[in-house]
Image (cartoon, rainbow, N blue to C red):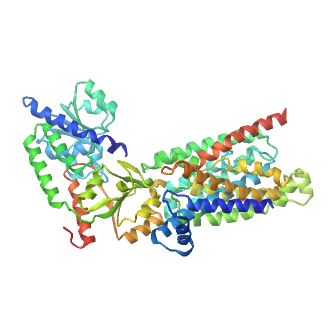
Protein backbone atom coordinates (compact mmCIF):
# COMPACT_ATOMS: atom_id res chain seq x y z
CA UNK A 1 0.00 0.00 0.00
CA UNK A 2 2.69 2.48 1.08
CA UNK A 3 4.96 1.24 -1.70
CA UNK A 4 2.19 1.74 -4.27
CA UNK A 5 1.52 5.25 -3.00
CA UNK A 6 5.22 6.14 -3.13
CA UNK A 7 5.55 4.65 -6.61
CA UNK A 8 2.60 6.78 -7.69
CA UNK A 9 4.23 9.88 -6.23
CA UNK A 10 7.49 9.13 -8.05
CA UNK A 11 5.59 8.62 -11.31
CA UNK A 12 3.82 11.97 -10.94
CA UNK A 13 7.04 13.81 -10.09
CA UNK A 14 8.86 12.07 -12.94
CA UNK A 15 6.20 13.27 -15.37
CA UNK A 16 6.33 16.78 -13.89
CA UNK A 17 10.11 16.80 -14.25
CA UNK A 18 9.71 15.99 -17.94
CA UNK A 19 7.30 18.86 -18.42
CA UNK A 20 9.26 21.56 -16.59
CA UNK A 21 11.98 23.46 -18.41
CA UNK A 22 13.11 26.81 -19.75
CA UNK A 23 11.78 26.05 -23.24
CA UNK A 24 8.02 26.60 -23.02
CA UNK A 25 6.60 23.48 -24.64
CA UNK A 26 2.97 22.47 -24.78
CA UNK A 27 1.86 19.30 -23.00
CA UNK A 28 0.64 17.49 -26.11
CA UNK A 29 3.64 18.66 -28.10
CA UNK A 30 6.04 17.35 -25.42
CA UNK A 31 4.37 13.97 -25.15
CA UNK A 32 4.12 13.46 -28.90
CA UNK A 33 7.81 14.28 -29.21
CA UNK A 34 8.79 11.99 -26.35
CA UNK A 35 6.79 8.94 -27.35
CA UNK A 36 6.31 9.27 -31.09
CA UNK A 37 9.31 11.36 -32.08
CA UNK A 38 7.34 14.16 -33.72
CA UNK A 39 8.95 17.57 -34.15
CA UNK A 40 12.70 17.63 -34.63
CA UNK A 41 13.74 20.24 -32.04
CA UNK A 42 11.16 19.18 -29.46
CA UNK A 43 12.29 15.56 -29.73
CA UNK A 44 15.86 16.66 -28.98
CA UNK A 45 14.70 18.64 -25.95
CA UNK A 46 12.51 15.86 -24.60
CA UNK A 47 14.69 12.83 -25.31
CA UNK A 48 18.21 14.22 -24.93
CA UNK A 49 17.80 16.92 -22.29
CA UNK A 50 14.74 16.39 -20.11
CA UNK A 51 14.49 12.59 -20.14
CA UNK A 52 18.05 12.01 -18.87
CA UNK A 53 17.53 14.71 -16.25
CA UNK A 54 14.35 13.10 -14.93
CA UNK A 55 15.87 9.61 -15.07
CA UNK A 56 18.95 10.73 -13.19
CA UNK A 57 16.83 12.53 -10.60
CA UNK A 58 14.94 9.33 -9.86
CA UNK A 59 18.07 7.16 -9.95
CA UNK A 60 20.26 9.40 -7.79
CA UNK A 61 17.48 10.01 -5.28
CA UNK A 62 16.64 6.33 -5.09
CA UNK A 63 20.31 5.47 -4.54
CA UNK A 64 20.75 8.00 -1.75
CA UNK A 65 17.51 7.07 0.03
CA UNK A 66 18.34 3.37 -0.13
CA UNK A 67 21.88 3.91 1.17
CA UNK A 68 20.62 6.01 4.06
CA UNK A 69 18.13 3.33 5.10
CA UNK A 70 20.69 0.53 4.80
CA UNK A 71 23.44 2.33 6.71
CA UNK A 72 21.09 3.42 9.47
CA UNK A 73 19.85 -0.15 9.78
CA UNK A 74 23.31 -1.64 9.87
CA UNK A 75 24.84 0.90 12.25
CA UNK A 76 21.61 1.13 14.23
CA UNK A 77 22.33 4.82 14.25
CA UNK A 78 19.77 7.36 13.06
CA UNK A 79 22.38 9.86 11.86
CA UNK A 80 24.13 7.63 9.32
CA UNK A 81 23.76 9.28 5.91
CA UNK A 82 26.18 9.12 2.97
CA UNK A 83 26.52 12.91 2.75
CA UNK A 84 26.96 13.56 6.47
CA UNK A 85 29.52 10.84 7.04
CA UNK A 86 31.73 11.80 4.13
CA UNK A 87 30.97 8.96 1.71
CA UNK A 88 29.57 11.32 -0.94
CA UNK A 89 32.47 13.74 -0.45
CA UNK A 90 35.01 10.94 -0.91
CA UNK A 91 33.17 9.69 -3.98
CA UNK A 92 33.36 13.23 -5.38
CA UNK A 93 37.09 13.24 -4.73
CA UNK A 94 37.43 9.96 -6.63
CA UNK A 95 35.41 11.36 -9.54
CA UNK A 96 37.43 14.58 -9.67
CA UNK A 97 40.70 12.64 -9.67
CA UNK A 98 39.45 10.47 -12.56
CA UNK A 99 38.43 13.57 -14.53
CA UNK A 100 41.53 15.67 -13.90
CA UNK A 101 44.06 12.91 -14.51
CA UNK A 102 42.45 12.26 -17.88
CA UNK A 103 41.55 8.70 -16.87
CA UNK A 104 37.85 9.38 -17.45
CA UNK A 105 38.54 10.73 -20.92
CA UNK A 106 40.60 7.67 -21.85
CA UNK A 107 38.19 5.15 -20.37
CA UNK A 108 34.63 6.25 -19.58
CA UNK A 109 34.05 3.74 -16.78
CA UNK A 110 37.04 5.16 -14.91
CA UNK A 111 34.76 7.94 -13.67
CA UNK A 112 32.19 5.82 -11.77
CA UNK A 113 34.85 3.28 -10.77
CA UNK A 114 37.09 5.92 -9.26
CA UNK A 115 34.13 7.51 -7.44
CA UNK A 116 33.22 4.04 -6.18
CA UNK A 117 36.77 3.55 -4.90
CA UNK A 118 36.56 6.88 -3.07
CA UNK A 119 33.27 5.81 -1.49
CA UNK A 120 34.68 2.41 -0.43
CA UNK A 121 37.58 4.10 1.36
CA UNK A 122 35.18 6.38 3.22
CA UNK A 123 32.80 3.56 4.22
CA UNK A 124 35.73 1.46 5.48
CA UNK A 125 37.04 4.39 7.48
CA UNK A 126 33.60 5.05 8.96
CA UNK A 127 33.10 1.41 9.91
CA UNK A 128 36.58 1.26 11.47
CA UNK A 129 36.06 4.47 13.45
CA UNK A 130 32.41 4.11 14.39
CA UNK A 131 31.25 0.55 13.75
CA UNK A 132 27.98 -0.85 15.04
CA UNK A 133 29.09 -0.28 18.63
CA UNK A 134 30.17 3.35 18.05
CA UNK A 135 27.98 6.13 19.38
CA UNK A 136 26.15 8.67 17.22
CA UNK A 137 28.66 11.28 18.33
CA UNK A 138 31.68 9.29 17.17
CA UNK A 139 29.96 8.60 13.85
CA UNK A 140 29.28 12.27 13.21
CA UNK A 141 32.76 13.36 14.29
CA UNK A 142 34.36 10.78 12.03
CA UNK A 143 32.06 11.93 9.24
CA UNK A 144 33.04 15.57 9.71
CA UNK A 145 36.72 14.67 9.55
CA UNK A 146 36.34 12.53 6.44
CA UNK A 147 34.13 15.15 4.74
CA UNK A 148 36.60 17.92 5.51
CA UNK A 149 39.56 15.95 4.21
CA UNK A 150 37.75 14.84 1.05
CA UNK A 151 36.45 18.37 0.44
CA UNK A 152 39.89 19.90 0.88
CA UNK A 153 41.52 17.39 -1.47
CA UNK A 154 38.75 17.92 -4.05
CA UNK A 155 39.30 21.68 -3.92
CA UNK A 156 43.06 21.16 -4.19
CA UNK A 157 42.78 18.95 -7.28
CA UNK A 158 40.36 21.37 -8.96
CA UNK A 159 42.50 24.42 -8.13
CA UNK A 160 45.58 22.76 -9.61
CA UNK A 161 43.76 21.89 -12.84
CA UNK A 162 45.01 23.68 -15.97
CA UNK A 163 41.35 24.21 -16.85
CA UNK A 164 40.12 27.67 -15.78
CA UNK A 165 36.58 26.36 -15.24
CA UNK A 166 37.58 23.55 -12.89
CA UNK A 167 38.08 25.64 -9.76
CA UNK A 168 34.63 27.19 -10.07
CA UNK A 169 33.16 23.69 -10.04
CA UNK A 170 34.07 22.98 -6.43
CA UNK A 171 30.53 24.00 -5.55
CA UNK A 172 29.07 21.50 -8.02
CA UNK A 173 30.99 18.63 -6.44
CA UNK A 174 29.89 19.68 -2.96
CA UNK A 175 26.27 20.57 -3.71
CA UNK A 176 25.32 18.54 -6.77
CA UNK A 177 23.28 19.39 -9.84
CA UNK A 178 21.50 17.64 -12.70
CA UNK A 179 21.74 20.52 -15.17
CA UNK A 180 22.72 19.57 -18.74
CA UNK A 181 23.36 15.91 -18.03
CA UNK A 182 22.81 13.52 -20.91
CA UNK A 183 21.88 9.91 -21.62
CA UNK A 184 25.61 9.17 -21.57
CA UNK A 185 25.55 9.84 -17.83
CA UNK A 186 22.44 7.70 -17.38
CA UNK A 187 24.16 4.73 -19.05
CA UNK A 188 27.33 5.35 -17.09
CA UNK A 189 25.57 5.26 -13.73
CA UNK A 190 22.80 2.74 -14.38
CA UNK A 191 24.76 -0.55 -14.18
CA UNK A 192 26.51 0.41 -10.94
CA UNK A 193 23.26 1.60 -9.40
CA UNK A 194 21.40 -1.55 -10.43
CA UNK A 195 24.12 -3.72 -8.92
CA UNK A 196 24.30 -1.66 -5.72
CA UNK A 197 20.52 -1.59 -5.32
CA UNK A 198 20.28 -5.36 -5.78
CA UNK A 199 22.95 -5.85 -3.13
CA UNK A 200 21.38 -3.54 -0.54
CA UNK A 201 17.82 -4.78 -1.13
CA UNK A 202 19.06 -8.33 -0.47
CA UNK A 203 20.09 -7.28 3.05
CA UNK A 204 16.51 -6.84 4.30
CA UNK A 205 16.32 -10.05 6.30
CA UNK A 206 19.77 -9.57 7.82
CA UNK A 207 19.03 -5.99 8.85
CA UNK A 208 15.70 -7.09 10.38
CA UNK A 209 17.57 -9.65 12.48
CA UNK A 210 20.15 -7.04 13.45
CA UNK A 211 17.50 -4.91 15.13
CA UNK A 212 17.55 -7.60 17.85
CA UNK A 213 21.30 -7.20 18.34
CA UNK A 214 24.36 -8.82 16.80
CA UNK A 215 24.29 -11.98 18.91
CA UNK A 216 20.63 -12.60 18.19
CA UNK A 217 21.25 -12.01 14.49
CA UNK A 218 24.10 -14.50 14.43
CA UNK A 219 21.96 -16.99 16.32
CA UNK A 220 19.37 -16.59 13.56
CA UNK A 221 21.97 -17.62 11.01
CA UNK A 222 22.97 -14.17 9.70
CA UNK A 223 26.62 -14.04 8.65
CA UNK A 224 27.59 -10.58 9.82
CA UNK A 225 30.94 -10.44 8.00
CA UNK A 226 29.23 -11.16 4.70
CA UNK A 227 26.44 -8.69 5.46
CA UNK A 228 29.03 -5.98 6.18
CA UNK A 229 30.89 -6.68 2.93
CA UNK A 230 27.70 -6.53 0.85
CA UNK A 231 26.69 -3.31 2.60
CA UNK A 232 30.05 -1.66 1.94
CA UNK A 233 30.14 -2.60 -1.74
CA UNK A 234 26.46 -1.86 -2.35
CA UNK A 235 26.66 1.56 -0.70
CA UNK A 236 29.86 2.43 -2.53
CA UNK A 237 28.39 1.41 -5.90
CA UNK A 238 25.25 3.49 -5.35
CA UNK A 239 26.87 6.58 -3.85
CA UNK A 240 29.84 6.38 -6.21
CA UNK A 241 27.69 6.24 -9.33
CA UNK A 242 25.29 8.93 -8.07
CA UNK A 243 28.07 11.32 -7.11
CA UNK A 244 30.09 10.73 -10.27
CA UNK A 245 27.26 12.07 -12.43
CA UNK A 246 25.41 14.46 -10.12
CA UNK A 247 27.87 15.63 -7.45
CA UNK A 248 27.36 15.20 -3.72
CA UNK A 249 23.74 15.75 -2.70
CA UNK A 250 23.29 15.72 1.06
CA UNK A 251 20.52 14.90 3.51
CA UNK A 252 18.36 12.76 1.18
CA UNK A 253 19.45 9.58 2.95
CA UNK A 254 18.77 11.19 6.31
CA UNK A 255 15.36 12.74 5.80
CA UNK A 256 13.65 10.06 3.74
CA UNK A 257 14.21 6.99 5.95
CA UNK A 258 13.17 8.98 9.00
CA UNK A 259 9.90 10.10 7.54
CA UNK A 260 9.10 6.61 6.29
CA UNK A 261 10.31 4.53 9.23
CA UNK A 262 7.16 4.89 11.36
CA UNK A 263 5.05 4.02 8.32
CA UNK A 264 6.74 0.64 7.77
CA UNK A 265 6.67 -0.47 11.40
CA UNK A 266 10.39 0.22 11.77
CA UNK A 267 11.26 -2.95 9.82
CA UNK A 268 14.44 -2.40 7.75
CA UNK A 269 13.36 -4.97 5.14
CA UNK A 270 10.26 -2.90 4.38
CA UNK A 271 12.05 0.42 4.83
CA UNK A 272 14.66 -0.29 2.13
CA UNK A 273 12.38 -0.22 -0.95
CA UNK A 274 10.23 2.53 0.56
CA UNK A 275 13.29 4.72 1.20
CA UNK A 276 14.50 4.17 -2.37
CA UNK A 277 11.17 5.40 -3.74
CA UNK A 278 11.02 8.23 -1.20
CA UNK A 279 14.54 9.35 -2.11
CA UNK A 280 13.62 9.37 -5.79
CA UNK A 281 10.59 11.51 -5.02
CA UNK A 282 12.63 13.93 -2.90
CA UNK A 283 15.37 14.52 -5.48
CA UNK A 284 12.86 14.77 -8.34
CA UNK A 285 10.91 17.35 -6.34
CA UNK A 286 14.09 19.27 -5.48
CA UNK A 287 15.17 19.24 -9.12
CA UNK A 288 11.79 20.56 -10.23
CA UNK A 289 12.03 23.26 -7.56
CA UNK A 290 15.50 24.46 -8.64
CA UNK A 291 14.17 24.91 -12.16
CA UNK A 292 11.11 26.82 -10.97
CA UNK A 293 12.96 29.02 -8.48
CA UNK A 294 15.83 29.99 -10.78
CA UNK A 295 15.07 28.93 -14.37
CA UNK A 296 18.07 30.62 -15.95
CA UNK A 297 20.76 29.75 -13.47
CA UNK A 298 22.06 26.50 -12.18
CA UNK A 299 20.84 26.52 -8.57
CA UNK A 300 22.45 23.50 -6.92
CA UNK A 301 20.29 20.60 -5.77
CA UNK A 302 22.17 20.28 -2.50
CA UNK A 303 21.05 23.78 -1.56
CA UNK A 304 17.42 22.67 -1.50
CA UNK A 305 17.99 19.29 0.11
CA UNK A 306 20.06 20.99 2.83
CA UNK A 307 17.38 23.63 3.39
CA UNK A 308 14.96 20.80 4.12
CA UNK A 309 17.46 18.40 5.63
CA UNK A 310 19.50 20.57 7.99
CA UNK A 311 16.57 21.68 10.20
CA UNK A 312 15.51 18.05 10.19
CA UNK A 313 19.00 17.10 11.31
CA UNK A 314 18.83 19.61 14.17
CA UNK A 315 15.50 18.13 15.18
CA UNK A 316 17.05 14.64 15.22
CA UNK A 317 19.98 15.79 17.35
CA UNK A 318 17.49 17.38 19.75
CA UNK A 319 15.55 14.14 19.96
CA UNK A 320 18.72 12.05 20.40
CA UNK A 321 19.79 14.34 23.24
CA UNK A 322 16.47 14.05 24.99
CA UNK A 323 16.48 10.28 24.60
CA UNK A 324 19.97 10.13 26.10
CA UNK A 325 19.07 12.41 29.02
CA UNK B 1 33.96 36.83 -18.68
CA UNK B 2 30.77 38.82 -18.36
CA UNK B 3 32.62 41.76 -16.87
CA UNK B 4 34.66 41.93 -20.03
CA UNK B 5 31.67 43.26 -21.88
CA UNK B 6 29.60 45.11 -19.37
CA UNK B 7 31.14 48.51 -18.87
CA UNK B 8 32.18 48.83 -22.47
CA UNK B 9 29.45 51.33 -23.18
CA UNK B 10 31.47 53.87 -21.29
CA UNK B 11 34.10 53.56 -23.93
CA UNK B 12 32.81 56.34 -26.16
CA UNK B 13 33.50 58.93 -23.51
CA UNK B 14 36.85 57.42 -22.72
CA UNK B 15 37.98 57.41 -26.32
CA UNK B 16 36.94 61.01 -26.73
CA UNK B 17 38.99 61.84 -23.67
CA UNK B 18 42.00 60.05 -25.08
CA UNK B 19 41.66 61.85 -28.38
CA UNK B 20 41.14 65.15 -26.65
CA UNK B 21 44.34 64.69 -24.67
CA UNK B 22 46.31 63.97 -27.79
CA UNK B 23 44.88 66.90 -29.68
CA UNK B 24 44.94 69.44 -26.88
CA UNK B 25 48.48 68.78 -25.75
CA UNK B 26 50.57 68.31 -28.88
CA UNK B 27 53.56 69.80 -27.11
CA UNK B 28 53.89 66.74 -24.83
CA UNK B 29 56.79 64.61 -25.97
CA UNK B 30 55.88 61.09 -27.03
CA UNK B 31 56.50 58.57 -24.23
CA UNK B 32 59.87 56.86 -24.67
CA UNK B 33 59.19 53.74 -22.61
CA UNK B 34 55.75 52.15 -22.90
CA UNK B 35 54.55 49.00 -21.13
CA UNK B 36 51.29 47.27 -22.06
CA UNK B 37 49.65 44.99 -19.48
CA UNK B 38 46.54 43.94 -21.40
CA UNK B 39 46.24 41.43 -24.23
CA UNK B 40 44.32 43.85 -26.46
CA UNK B 41 46.42 46.95 -25.80
CA UNK B 42 49.46 44.70 -26.45
CA UNK B 43 48.29 44.21 -30.01
CA UNK B 44 47.56 47.86 -30.72
CA UNK B 45 50.85 48.93 -29.15
CA UNK B 46 52.85 46.41 -31.16
CA UNK B 47 51.19 47.62 -34.35
CA UNK B 48 51.58 51.33 -33.63
CA UNK B 49 54.66 51.94 -31.48
CA UNK B 50 57.85 53.41 -32.90
CA UNK B 51 60.86 51.06 -32.88
CA UNK B 52 62.18 50.81 -29.33
CA UNK B 53 59.23 52.67 -27.83
CA UNK B 54 57.38 49.60 -26.52
CA UNK B 55 59.32 47.94 -23.72
CA UNK B 56 57.09 45.10 -22.55
CA UNK B 57 53.80 43.39 -23.28
CA UNK B 58 51.58 41.13 -21.15
CA UNK B 59 52.35 37.46 -20.53
CA UNK B 60 49.13 36.55 -22.36
CA UNK B 61 50.63 37.84 -25.61
CA UNK B 62 52.65 34.60 -25.59
CA UNK B 63 49.61 32.32 -25.36
CA UNK B 64 48.46 31.10 -28.78
CA UNK B 65 44.96 30.33 -27.37
CA UNK B 66 44.45 34.05 -26.70
CA UNK B 67 47.00 36.01 -28.67
CA UNK B 68 47.05 36.61 -32.42
CA UNK B 69 50.52 38.14 -32.30
CA UNK B 70 52.62 35.45 -30.63
CA UNK B 71 55.41 35.87 -33.23
CA UNK B 72 55.71 39.63 -32.83
CA UNK B 73 55.45 39.37 -29.04
CA UNK B 74 58.68 37.32 -28.96
CA UNK B 75 60.72 40.49 -29.31
CA UNK B 76 59.40 42.08 -26.12
CA UNK B 77 59.83 41.52 -22.41
CA UNK B 78 56.74 40.04 -20.68
CA UNK B 79 54.96 41.27 -17.60
CA UNK B 80 52.30 39.74 -15.40
CA UNK B 81 51.00 43.24 -14.80
CA UNK B 82 51.73 43.60 -11.08
CA UNK B 83 52.51 47.21 -10.18
CA UNK B 84 55.89 46.35 -8.70
CA UNK B 85 57.16 44.58 -11.79
CA UNK B 86 55.78 47.22 -14.15
CA UNK B 87 57.18 50.12 -12.11
CA UNK B 88 60.68 48.65 -12.18
CA UNK B 89 60.57 48.81 -15.98
CA UNK B 90 60.51 52.64 -15.58
CA UNK B 91 57.69 53.28 -18.05
CA UNK B 92 56.55 56.76 -19.11
CA UNK B 93 53.23 55.26 -20.09
CA UNK B 94 51.32 52.12 -19.18
CA UNK B 95 48.53 50.81 -21.41
CA UNK B 96 45.92 48.79 -19.54
CA UNK B 97 42.44 47.43 -20.03
CA UNK B 98 39.66 48.70 -17.80
CA UNK B 99 39.53 45.16 -16.36
CA UNK B 100 43.19 45.15 -15.44
CA UNK B 101 43.57 44.76 -11.67
CA UNK B 102 42.37 48.03 -10.14
CA UNK B 103 44.88 47.78 -7.34
CA UNK B 104 47.81 47.62 -9.77
CA UNK B 105 46.57 50.54 -11.86
CA UNK B 106 45.86 52.71 -8.81
CA UNK B 107 49.26 51.97 -7.34
CA UNK B 108 51.03 52.86 -10.58
CA UNK B 109 49.14 56.14 -10.77
CA UNK B 110 50.09 56.96 -7.18
CA UNK B 111 53.69 56.31 -8.11
CA UNK B 112 53.33 58.96 -10.81
CA UNK B 113 53.14 56.68 -13.84
CA UNK B 114 50.72 57.72 -16.55
CA UNK B 115 48.19 54.96 -17.26
CA UNK B 116 45.86 54.95 -20.25
CA UNK B 117 42.97 52.49 -19.88
CA UNK B 118 41.02 51.04 -22.75
CA UNK B 119 37.58 49.48 -22.31
CA UNK B 120 36.93 46.26 -24.21
CA UNK B 121 35.39 46.83 -27.62
CA UNK B 122 31.66 46.19 -27.70
CA UNK B 123 31.22 46.76 -31.44
CA UNK B 124 33.37 46.86 -34.53
CA UNK B 125 33.27 50.66 -34.75
CA UNK B 126 35.02 50.76 -31.36
CA UNK B 127 38.12 49.37 -33.04
CA UNK B 128 38.72 52.63 -34.91
CA UNK B 129 38.43 54.60 -31.67
CA UNK B 130 40.79 52.21 -29.92
CA UNK B 131 43.41 52.57 -32.63
CA UNK B 132 43.22 56.37 -32.50
CA UNK B 133 43.32 56.44 -28.69
CA UNK B 134 46.43 54.30 -28.48
CA UNK B 135 47.98 56.19 -31.40
CA UNK B 136 47.43 59.49 -29.60
CA UNK B 137 48.84 58.14 -26.36
CA UNK B 138 51.95 56.91 -28.16
CA UNK B 139 52.37 60.14 -30.14
CA UNK B 140 51.88 58.18 -33.35
CA UNK B 141 48.79 59.87 -34.75
CA UNK B 142 49.58 59.59 -38.48
CA UNK B 143 50.29 55.86 -38.17
CA UNK B 144 47.11 55.40 -36.15
CA UNK B 145 45.05 57.31 -38.69
CA UNK B 146 46.42 55.17 -41.53
CA UNK B 147 45.74 51.96 -39.61
CA UNK B 148 42.23 53.08 -38.68
CA UNK B 149 41.41 54.04 -42.27
CA UNK B 150 42.73 50.74 -43.54
CA UNK B 151 40.63 48.89 -40.96
CA UNK B 152 37.47 50.80 -41.88
CA UNK B 153 38.02 50.13 -45.59
CA UNK B 154 38.69 46.42 -45.06
CA UNK B 155 35.64 46.10 -42.83
CA UNK B 156 33.43 47.87 -45.35
CA UNK B 157 34.63 45.46 -48.05
CA UNK B 158 33.80 42.42 -45.90
CA UNK B 159 30.44 43.61 -44.62
CA UNK B 160 27.37 41.72 -45.82
CA UNK B 161 23.92 43.26 -45.82
CA UNK B 162 21.72 40.19 -45.78
CA UNK B 163 18.09 40.50 -46.67
CA UNK B 164 17.34 37.37 -44.71
CA UNK B 165 19.94 36.93 -42.02
CA UNK B 166 20.80 33.36 -40.97
CA UNK B 167 20.28 32.35 -37.33
CA UNK B 168 23.58 31.90 -35.51
CA UNK B 169 24.41 31.21 -31.89
CA UNK B 170 27.57 31.69 -29.88
CA UNK B 171 27.66 28.88 -27.35
CA UNK B 172 30.24 28.50 -24.61
CA UNK B 173 30.84 26.43 -21.46
CA UNK B 174 28.00 26.51 -18.91
CA UNK B 175 25.59 27.54 -21.66
CA UNK B 176 27.12 31.01 -21.80
CA UNK B 177 26.28 33.07 -24.83
CA UNK B 178 27.07 36.57 -26.04
CA UNK B 179 23.99 38.67 -26.66
CA UNK B 180 23.33 42.22 -27.75
CA UNK B 181 25.96 44.88 -27.25
CA UNK B 182 28.99 42.64 -27.70
CA UNK B 183 31.76 42.54 -30.27
CA UNK B 184 30.77 38.98 -31.21
CA UNK B 185 27.17 40.11 -31.78
CA UNK B 186 28.39 42.87 -34.05
CA UNK B 187 30.59 40.43 -35.99
CA UNK B 188 27.58 38.18 -36.57
CA UNK B 189 25.25 40.96 -37.68
CA UNK B 190 27.94 42.44 -39.93
CA UNK B 191 28.33 39.17 -41.80
CA UNK B 192 24.75 38.21 -42.60
CA UNK B 193 23.78 36.45 -39.39
CA UNK B 194 21.27 37.21 -36.66
CA UNK B 195 22.38 36.47 -33.13
CA UNK B 196 20.13 33.90 -31.42
CA UNK B 197 21.55 34.96 -28.04
CA UNK B 198 20.47 38.56 -28.56
CA UNK B 199 17.05 37.42 -29.79
CA UNK B 200 16.67 35.34 -26.62
CA UNK B 201 16.98 38.56 -24.65
CA UNK B 202 20.60 38.25 -23.54
CA UNK B 203 22.43 41.56 -23.29
CA UNK B 204 26.16 41.43 -22.87
CA UNK B 205 27.03 37.93 -21.75
CA UNK B 206 24.55 35.57 -20.15
CA UNK B 207 23.20 32.08 -19.99
CA UNK B 208 21.06 30.47 -22.63
CA UNK B 209 19.65 27.12 -21.47
CA UNK B 210 20.45 24.30 -23.89
CA UNK B 211 16.72 23.65 -24.33
CA UNK B 212 16.11 27.13 -25.64
CA UNK B 213 19.11 26.92 -27.95
CA UNK B 214 17.72 23.69 -29.40
CA UNK B 215 14.27 25.23 -29.90
CA UNK B 216 15.78 28.28 -31.65
CA UNK B 217 17.35 25.85 -34.19
CA UNK B 218 20.36 27.95 -35.23
CA UNK B 219 21.87 27.18 -38.61
CA UNK B 220 25.32 28.22 -37.45
CA UNK B 221 26.82 27.37 -34.08
CA UNK B 222 30.00 28.99 -32.88
CA UNK B 223 31.64 27.33 -29.86
CA UNK B 224 34.99 27.60 -28.12
CA UNK B 225 37.99 25.30 -27.93
CA UNK B 226 38.04 23.35 -24.65
CA UNK B 227 40.93 24.08 -22.31
CA UNK B 228 43.30 21.33 -21.24
CA UNK B 229 42.27 19.35 -18.17
CA UNK B 230 38.60 18.55 -17.68
CA UNK B 231 35.61 20.53 -16.51
CA UNK B 232 31.94 19.91 -16.13
CA UNK B 233 31.32 23.39 -17.54
CA UNK B 234 32.71 22.37 -20.90
CA UNK B 235 30.84 19.07 -21.04
CA UNK B 236 27.88 20.96 -22.46
CA UNK B 237 29.92 21.41 -25.65
CA UNK B 238 29.86 17.63 -26.20
CA UNK B 239 26.24 17.15 -25.08
CA UNK B 240 24.40 14.80 -27.49
CA UNK B 241 21.67 17.40 -28.02
CA UNK B 242 24.24 19.97 -29.12
CA UNK B 243 25.93 17.39 -31.33
CA UNK B 244 22.59 16.65 -33.02
CA UNK B 245 21.97 20.37 -33.40
CA UNK B 246 25.39 20.82 -35.01
CA UNK B 247 24.58 18.07 -37.46
CA UNK B 248 21.28 19.62 -38.55
CA UNK B 249 22.74 23.12 -38.52
CA UNK B 250 25.31 22.06 -41.06
CA UNK B 251 27.68 24.83 -40.05
CA UNK B 252 29.76 25.03 -36.93
CA UNK B 253 32.80 27.10 -36.18
CA UNK B 254 35.10 27.59 -33.25
CA UNK B 255 36.06 30.97 -31.85
CA UNK B 256 39.74 31.60 -31.42
CA UNK B 257 42.09 34.41 -30.54
CA UNK B 258 40.79 36.41 -33.54
CA UNK B 259 37.50 37.04 -31.72
CA UNK B 260 38.87 38.35 -28.45
CA UNK B 261 40.20 41.82 -29.09
CA UNK B 262 38.83 44.88 -30.82
CA UNK B 263 41.92 45.34 -32.98
CA UNK B 264 42.40 45.09 -36.75
CA UNK B 265 43.02 41.34 -36.30
CA UNK B 266 39.31 40.90 -35.60
CA UNK B 267 38.88 41.26 -39.36
CA UNK B 268 40.05 37.65 -39.67
CA UNK B 269 37.03 36.57 -37.62
CA UNK B 270 34.82 38.84 -39.72
CA UNK B 271 36.25 37.39 -42.94
CA UNK B 272 35.77 33.82 -41.70
CA UNK B 273 32.13 34.46 -40.81
CA UNK B 274 31.49 36.30 -44.08
CA UNK B 275 32.98 33.33 -45.93
CA UNK B 276 30.79 30.94 -43.96
CA UNK B 277 27.72 33.01 -44.80
CA UNK B 278 28.56 32.94 -48.51
CA UNK B 279 29.15 29.19 -48.38
CA UNK B 280 25.78 28.65 -46.67
CA UNK B 281 23.75 30.86 -48.97
CA UNK B 282 25.64 30.09 -52.15
CA UNK B 283 26.98 33.50 -52.93
CA UNK B 284 25.09 36.22 -51.15
CA UNK B 285 25.74 39.90 -51.51
| Residue shown at the point (21%, 72%) measured from the top left | B283
**Of residues A212 and B142, the one drawn nearer to the viewer in this rendering:** B142
Q: Is residue B119 visible?
A: yes
| Residue shown at the point (6%, 29%) measured from the top left | B27
Q: Is residue A104 left or right of residue A210?
A: left
Q: Is residue A236 left or right of residue B4?
A: right
Q: Is residue A165 left or right of residue B50?
A: right
Residue A50 at x, y = what percent?
A: 54, 62
Q: Is residue A2 left or right of residue B97?
A: right
Location of residue A56 (image quadrant): bottom right
Q: Is residue A236 visible?
A: no
Residue A13 at x, y = what percent?
A: 64, 59
Residue A302 at x, y = what percent?
A: 60, 47
B60 versus A238 height, above or below: above
Location of residue B247 (image quadrant): bottom left
Residue B14 at x, y = what percent?
A: 22, 36
Q: Quadrant of the C terminus of chain B?
A: bottom left
B53 versus A32 height, above or below: above
**Of residues B235 and B186, the one drawn nearer to the viewer in this rendering:** B186
Amino acid sequence: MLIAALAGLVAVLFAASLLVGPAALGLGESLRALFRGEGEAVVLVMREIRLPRALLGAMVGGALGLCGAAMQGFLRNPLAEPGLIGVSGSAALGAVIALQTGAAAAFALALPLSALAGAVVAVLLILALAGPRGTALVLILAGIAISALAGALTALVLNLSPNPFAASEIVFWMMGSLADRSMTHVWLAAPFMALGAAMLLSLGRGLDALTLGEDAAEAMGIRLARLRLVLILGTAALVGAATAVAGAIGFVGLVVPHILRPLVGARPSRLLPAAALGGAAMVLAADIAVRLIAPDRDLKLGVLTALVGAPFFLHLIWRTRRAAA
Amino acid sequence: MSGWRKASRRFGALAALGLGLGAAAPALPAPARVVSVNLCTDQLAMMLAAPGQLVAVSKLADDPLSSVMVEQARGYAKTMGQAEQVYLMHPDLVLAGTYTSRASVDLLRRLGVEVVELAPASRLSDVTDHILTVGAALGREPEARALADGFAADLAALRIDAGQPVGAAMYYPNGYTTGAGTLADDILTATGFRNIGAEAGVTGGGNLPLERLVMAAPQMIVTSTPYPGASRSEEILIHPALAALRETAGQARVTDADWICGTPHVLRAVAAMAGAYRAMTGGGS
